[in-house]
Image (cartoon, rainbow, N blue to C red):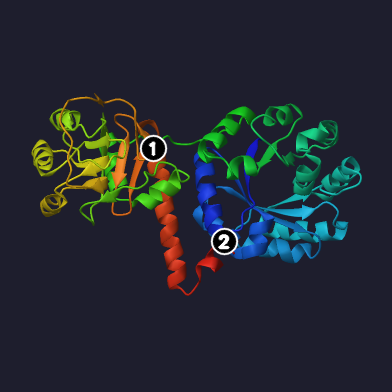
């Protein structure tokens, strides 16, 4: 057997649900309710993860040392498939745990952390009837001694060779060390920070599955059309999108002329300088209906846009305009209700010399914008989403939205925000 298990060693159930969803999308087939999560939220964490992921193998990392029957029964009744018992626990604790596991049709994993003679104890635990063994490098050892589970490769191989039951490994596993552990005979790869702290949890999980040979059985969803992606972004506030992008993509210092608007569309880029608005109005003629014209006017306090340009844009079907620079006629634009974001409003306009460039990579309000990138703007601000990552970021932003709803529900039920986050 081969399994990829994500160790959800986080403090918040909401964070665990978010990471788990991304990990499962990448092929993770075992979910571990980590010890910090269980200590912070108890069996509620097990129950919520079971409800959210009914098809995943759910591991409760209780690190049971005593009262094996009570703890196993408790975890089983809340949906756990596997319960972790410390290898240093007395044999009687294991026997009681195994009896309850058999009664509830679940499995027992023995964690060899801190065991003086791991090979000998592994044989004893197999004889007692445990289902899995775990070779575990403690977090404190990883931090202080800079060791990971692959540091003790000889011991690991000896344990694998001494027993017939599957052996799991945990402690600093990465994309680089996973192949080494695979050759050592590890069956269950327990990965924590390499997944929970990854910028792309789904992608990292998918690569780990390929490395260790986990059969993912993931149904690939057809990617929606660009129009569907844009419509999806238009339904989400910019803070959710910023969260999904790990706080990247947000333009700085731009303000809406018309409040209460939310738009999304592909960028048509313009670079100009010195208040020259020639290329800006030319972009109105060349942009496609539904485009968002994005102008790098170098943040200057000179208007490159006004009422007449707005009337032309409306006529041509331009969805919105974003300008890192000045505009004028704000009162008229407000009356027209046209979605426009700018850095400044000023009566002073430049001259149309025609200098500048169209449809090239620009920098607008601190963010790179390429032609076709998705620009999302609302009363809070403006966010740019790279076109090639648009679907993935949309999916993550929708997860942020769902998480926000859960937070609101918790507050409505009487919880405080600090309680929800386990602070």
Camera sees residue 148: yes
* x and y, in percent, of residue 65 in the image: 81, 60
- Using the rendered image of the protein, determine whether residue 55 is visible from the camera's viewpoint: no
Q: Quadrant of residue 76?
A: bottom right
Q: Taking 309 as reference, is 18 left or right?
A: right
Tell me the tag on residue 10.
none
Q: Is residue 71 above or below residue 218?
A: below
Q: Indicate the secondary structure of the residue bearing disc 2.
A: helix
The one nearer the camera, 337 or 412, is 337
Residue 303 in percent (x, y) is at: 20, 41
Left or right: where 354 falls relative to 102:
left
Q: Is residue 165 left or right of residue 220?
A: right
Callout 2 crowding tier (Cα within 10 Å): few <14, some 14–19, many ≥20: some
**Quadrant holding the N terminus:** top right
Instruction: Give the residue at the far front of this rendering.
Output: 348
Which residue sits at x=73%, y=31%? 181
Q: Label 2: which residue?
A: 47
Q: Residues within 10 Å of mark 1 (few under 14, many from 20)?
A: some
**Relative image position of residue 378 (x, y in whole percent):** 28, 51
On the image, numbered disc 1 is attached to which residue?
Answer: 367
Q: Residue at point 13% right, 54% down?
A: 331
Q: x, y (%) of residue 352?
A: 15, 30
Q: Quadrant of the C terminus?
A: bottom right
**Element marked by disc 1:** strand
Q: 172 or 347: which is nearer to us?
A: 347
Task: Tell us which disc is closer to us: 2 or 1.
Answer: 1
């Amino acid at each position: 057997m081969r399994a990829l298990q994500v160790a959800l060693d986080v403090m918040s159930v909401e964070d665990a649900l978010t990471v788990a969803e991304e990990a499962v999308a990448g092929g993770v087939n075992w979910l571990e309710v980590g010890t910090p999560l269980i200590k912070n939220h108890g069996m509620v964490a097990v129950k919520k993860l079971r409800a959210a992921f009914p098809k995943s193998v759910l591991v409760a990392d209780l690190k049971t040392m005593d009262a094996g029957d009570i703890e196993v029964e408790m975890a089983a009744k809340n949906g756990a498939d596997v319960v972790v018992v410390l290898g240093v626990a007395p044999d009687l604790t294991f026997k009681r745990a195994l009896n309850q596991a058999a009664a509830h049709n679940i499995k027992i994993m023995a964690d060899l952390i801190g065991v003086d003679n791991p090979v000998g104890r592994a044989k004893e635990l197999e004889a007692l009837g445990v289902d899995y063994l775990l070779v575990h490098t403690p977090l404190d050892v990883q931090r202080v001694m800079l060791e990971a589970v692959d540091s003790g490769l000889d011991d690991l191989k000896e344990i694998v060779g001494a027993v017939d039951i599957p052996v799991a490994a945990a402690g600093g596993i990465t994309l680089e060390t996973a192949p080494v552990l695979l050759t050592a005979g590890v069956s269950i790869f327990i990965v924590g920070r390499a997944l929970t702290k990854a910028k792309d949890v789904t992608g990292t999980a998918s690569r780990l599955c390929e490395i260790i040979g986990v059969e993912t059985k993931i149904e690939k969803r057809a990617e929606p059309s660009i129009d569907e992606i844009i419509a999806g972004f238009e339904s989400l506030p910019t803070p959710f999108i910023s969260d999904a992008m790990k706080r990247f993509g947000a333009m700085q210092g731009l303000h809406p002329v018309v409040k209460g608007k939310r738009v999304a569309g592909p960028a048509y880029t313009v670079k100009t300088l010195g208040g020259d608005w020639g290329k800006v109005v030319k972009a109105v003629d060349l942009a496609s209906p539904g485009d968002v014209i994005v102008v790098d006017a170098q943040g200057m306090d000179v208007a490159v846009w006004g009422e007449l340009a707005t009337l032309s844009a409306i006529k041509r079907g331009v969805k919105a305009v974003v300008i890192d620079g000045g505009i004028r006629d704000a009162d008229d634009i407000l009356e027209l209700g046209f979605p426009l974001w700018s850095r400044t409003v000023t009566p002073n306009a430049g001259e149309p010399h025609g200098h500048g460039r169209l449809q090239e990579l620009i920098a607008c309000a601190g963010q790179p914008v390429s032609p076709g990138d998705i620009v999302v703007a609302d009363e809070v601000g403006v966010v740019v989403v790279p076109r090639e990552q648009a679907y993935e970021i949309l999916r993550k932003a929708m997860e942020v939205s769902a998480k926000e709803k859960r937070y609101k529900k918790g507050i409505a039920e009487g919880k405080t925000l600090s309680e929800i986050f386990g602070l």
